[in-house]
Amino acid sequence: QVQLLESGGGLVQAGESLRLSCVASGTVFGISFMRWYRQAPGKERDMVAQIEHDGTASYADSMKDRFTISRDNAKNTVFLQMDSLRPEDTAVYYCNADVRDWTSRTRNYWGQGTQVTVSS
C-alpha cells in the first residue's frame, strides 16, 4: 500500500506565501511523476504543476510565475511553493504521484488534499 499525505495548507492573506508538502509512504520502490492539482468549490480538479524524477517541471500557464514545484527523491516528497497568493487560488490542493511498488507495477495515487484559503 502507498499513501500520499499533504501538509502545509491554511488561511493566508492575499500576497502572502505558502509551501505545501506531500510525502509518499508505504511500499514505495520508485516515483516517476509527482503532481499537484487543485479543486475550487464547484469547479473541476485541475493540474497545477508536475515534476519528473529528474526535476523537470511544468506548470499550468496561469501559475508558472508564482508557483514552484520541487521534490526530494530521497524522502519521496514533493513541494509546492506558492507566492503572491490571490483569493482565486483558494482551493483544496491534492498531491498525485505515479508510484512503482513491490510488484514493479506503476500505479497512480492521490492524497486526501489540503485546504488553502486566501482572503482578500
Image (cartoon, helix red, strand yellow):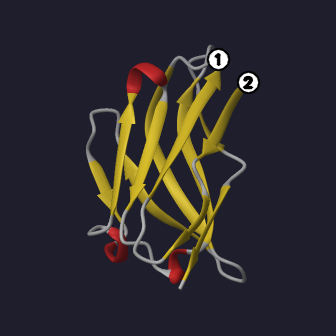
Residue at the spot x=52%, y=42% of the render?
A: 21
Image position, residue 46 (x, y; %): 54, 69
Which of the 4 image quadrants contains residue 97? Answer: top right
Residue holding disc 2: 1
Residue holding disc 1: 27
Image position, residue 42 (x, y; %): 72, 83
Between 79 and 33, the one lying in front of the other is 79
Whether the residues at callouts 1 and 2 have beta carbons within 8 Å, the answer is yes
Q: How many numbered marks are there?
A: 2
Q: Is mark 2 on a helix, strand or loop?
A: loop
- Examine the rendered structure and indicate whether residue 45 appears above or below residue 78: below
The mark that comes first in sequence, 1 or 2, is 2
Image position, residue 71 (x, y; %): 38, 36
Image position, residue 65 (x, y; %): 26, 69
Say whether residue 19 is left or right of residue 113.
left
Between 103 and 13, the one lying in front of the other is 13
